[in-house]
Amino acid sequence: MVPLPARRALLAAALGPVGRRRLPRHQAPATAARPSSGAGGEPEAEGPGRATAMLQHLLRKLRATGPVTVAEYMREALTNPGQGYYTRRGGVGESGDFVTSPEISQAFGELIGIWYVSEWIATGKPQAFQLVELGPGRGTLTDDILRVFNQLASLLSKCDVSIHLVEVSPKLSEIQALMLTGGKVQSNPEDESAYMKGVSKTGIPIFWYRDIQDVPPGYSFYLAHEFFDALPIHKFQRTEKGWREVLVDIDPDVPDQLRFVLSPSSTPATENFIPPEETRDHVEVCPEAGVILQRLVCRIEKDGGAALVADYGHDGTKTDTFRGFRNHKLHDVLRAPGTADLTADVDFSYLRKMTQGRTATLGPIKQREFLKNMGIDLRLQVLLQNSHDTATREQLLHSYDMLMNPQKMGDRFHFFALLPHHRLVHLDKKQKPKSPVQPVAGFGELLLK
Ligand code: SAH
């Protein structure tokens, strides 16, 4: 471990004496970010207008084609270009449907910013890096990271830093642009694969894309916080006749209502996604997460960098985790599609398998362990020392509790990293492990030198 005074000095350098966000903090709601199953209230009634339009669209589709997979249903409900939940509503934040760690506490994004700087140092301070965030929500996490980069401007002065946001939602990209650039952006810039570009308040170029494949190659740090849980899953059920896929269909008994049915026979997905050794009776698989993860792996293998994935999830043990959230309450996933967030726990064992050993992986480790290793206790102390009113101090303690309490987000959320193999083991000319490499912050100790 780095001695405490040294760690305090390093954190202070990175975070400044106070370094508060300029905007007032969101007061985190009393409930957890997304309440765990069983904690929800009554689903709200479906309103006229958009919800009906999305439901009508799905009903027409189901009448024409028959039942659809849960993945197809989820994709339509969340990212349909006209009426998808993220496309139109966005939902992140206190006034939305769920609140995320960066919305709860500025310390979260700051410590992640330090993680990237520590990786940049550990890999010999390359001349340039791209920070690529997948699904940036309101842009709060990137904003907090940029504040850390700004505090460390002298350290990063010779490094060419750029920000690349992968976002499908026009509504959320507008909110991100406002947060990060004050709204000064150029749409559809020529000579760029980005659909929008701007410059951060601290002078760093920012680009927006719909797909990770559009982000230019180069040494990059990737970030996916509460992104993989929003990607469409397939659901499978073991029956006496073998595995069947769970599908979404029209309920014949209730007008305009949807229901789950089982495929009458196996589907291509059942054949491809359930390994023979599977012991669970109900399984969820997110092939889109696998595809995106493999793209990250290829890029890290070729150009270097690292990826940090933070989400709630399990290691291939859970069964039925598909949930809806609206106004911070559990919401029936088949009710009023397009008006509620739909999500499923991330299967980290599947993500690890998808790397095919081409990068090293670290974690998943619990959020409270990662943040503790990153120095959240010191950061809290500094923020408390610099807060002179009781309400702010109480809010800081409340936010810390939300992130760290094992009953809240501390044990539910996990951190998982992808790194080039050479980051963890240095081999000499005879392919024997050389001098010990610098440990990776968060998953062990924090070293910044
Ligand atoms: N990372 C943010 C927000 C998480 S919500 C936070 O922690 O606060 C999920 C985000 O992923 C939203 O920004 C949503 O619009 C985006 N998203 C969902 N599906 C996507 C897809 N297929 N491609 C790109 N972005 C997507």
Image: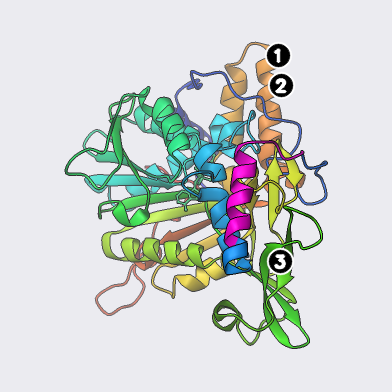
Examine the structure image and report whether residue 49 is included in the region drawn in magenta: yes
Mark 2 or mark 3, which is nearer the start of the sequence?
A: 3
Residue in the picture at 37% in, 53% down? 211
Discs 2, 1 touching: Cβ within 8 Å: yes
What's the magenta region? Answer: 45-61
Residue behind mark 2: 394
Residue type pointed to by label 3 = Lys
Residue behind mark 3: 318
Distance CA(mark 1)–CA(mark 3): 42 Å
Q: For the view shown, which residue lies furthest in the left direction?
A: 191
Which of 71/106 is in front?
A: 71
Residue behind mark 1: 390
Residue type pointed to by label 1 = Thr
Residue 50 vertical position relative to residue 13 in the rendered view, above or below: below
Q: Is residue 311 left or right of residue 11?
A: right
Classify mark 3: helix, strand or loop.
Answer: loop
Local packing at callout 3 (Cα closer than 10 Å; few below 14, some 14-19, many 20+) is some
Residue 120 vertical position relative to residue 238 in the rendered view, above or below: above
Distance CA(mark 3)–CA(mark 2): 36 Å
Examine the structure image and report whether residue 385 is included in the region drawn in magenta: no
Residue 119 vertical position relative to residue 283 in the rendered view, above or below: above
Q: Quadrant of residue 291?
A: bottom left
Viewport quadrant of the C terminus? top left
Residue in the picture at 54% in, 46% down? 84
Q: Quadrant of residue 59?
A: bottom right
